[in-house]
Amino acid sequence: MTLRPILIHPDPRLKTVADPVDSITDEIRRLADDMLETMYDAPGIGLAAPQIGQMCRLLVMDAAKEEDESARPMVLVNPTVTWTSEARSVYEEGCLSIPEQFAEVERPAEVEVQWLGLDGETHAERFDGLWATCVQHEIDHLDGKLFIDYLKPMKRQMITRKMVKLKRERARG
């Protein structure tokens, strides 16, 4: 497994719709392993392939945050939301591609998602709480959408300026 560099906003790849994965290959399995390692190392609870410059519809997540909860790494290939609740929830979201910036985002409280697993089988599950927020946030990445796109323009521009400054500072080393 290899740690992959995470793209920082603004980067045009983060605003691009990712391509569907045609089949589960060893390359896709390796990518998923690298993404899980990168996500845990960051640390984060979700990571989408476009965040590491891979333009395919693949995401990993593990929103098990409680002390007594076991890790539950998940790999979702070509995920689609098949149902959303009318009930809404608000979470303070962050993003590995927008480090140290957080904002409240309102989303459906529950979602049902269908995806292809690394076993080549179709899976479906209903998510709620942090899991629902996480899976929706990561699927947004596959559609070229960031959590800041839900914010008012002024707040979004402020965060974008901070990221431009951060990228400049990192480039200088």
Image (tube, helix red, strand yellow):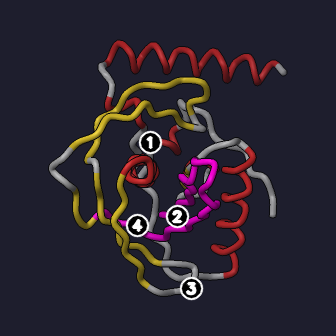
Name which residue lies at 45% across and 13% down: 158
Whichever of callouts 3 and 4 sits on the residue coming sooner in the sequence is 4
- Point out residue 39 in the picture as x, y percentages from the top left corner: 66, 50
**Image position of 5 (left or right of 101):** right
Task: Identify whether 7 is placed above or below 57.
Answer: above
- Cα distance between the residues tagged 2 and 3: 14 Å
| Secondary structure under the numbered disc 3 in the rendered image | loop
- Report, in whole angstroms, how far the alpha carbon at label 4 lies from the one at label 1: 18 Å
Q: Is residue 87 above or below residue 127?
A: above
Residue under label 1, please give it.
Answer: 15
Q: Residues within 10 Å of mark 3 (few under 14, many from 20)?
A: few
Q: Which residue is denoted by mark 3 in the rendering?
A: 119
Q: Which mark is residue 79?
A: 4
Give the mark nearest the N terminus, 1 or 2: 1
Q: Amino acid at mark 3?
A: Asp
Residues at marks 2 and 3 touching, judged by CB atoms closer than 8 Å: no
Spatial separation of the CA atoms under disc 3 and disc 4: 14 Å
Q: Which residues are magenta?
A: 56-81
Q: CA distance from mark 1 to mark 2?
A: 15 Å
Which residue type carries mark 4?
Pro
- Assess disc 2: are there few (<14), some (14-19) or many (≥20) residues with their C-alpha within 10 Å of its C-alpha: many
**Residue 63: percent from the left, percent from the top?**
53, 52
Asked which quadrant contains residue 113, the reply is bottom left
Q: Quadrant of the C terminus?
A: top right
Q: Residue at x 77, y 24 (%)?
A: 171
The mark lying in front, picked from 1 and 3, is 3
Q: Amino acid at mark 2?
A: Leu
Q: Nearer the viewer, mark 4 or mark 1?
A: 4
Which residue position is annotated with label 2? 58
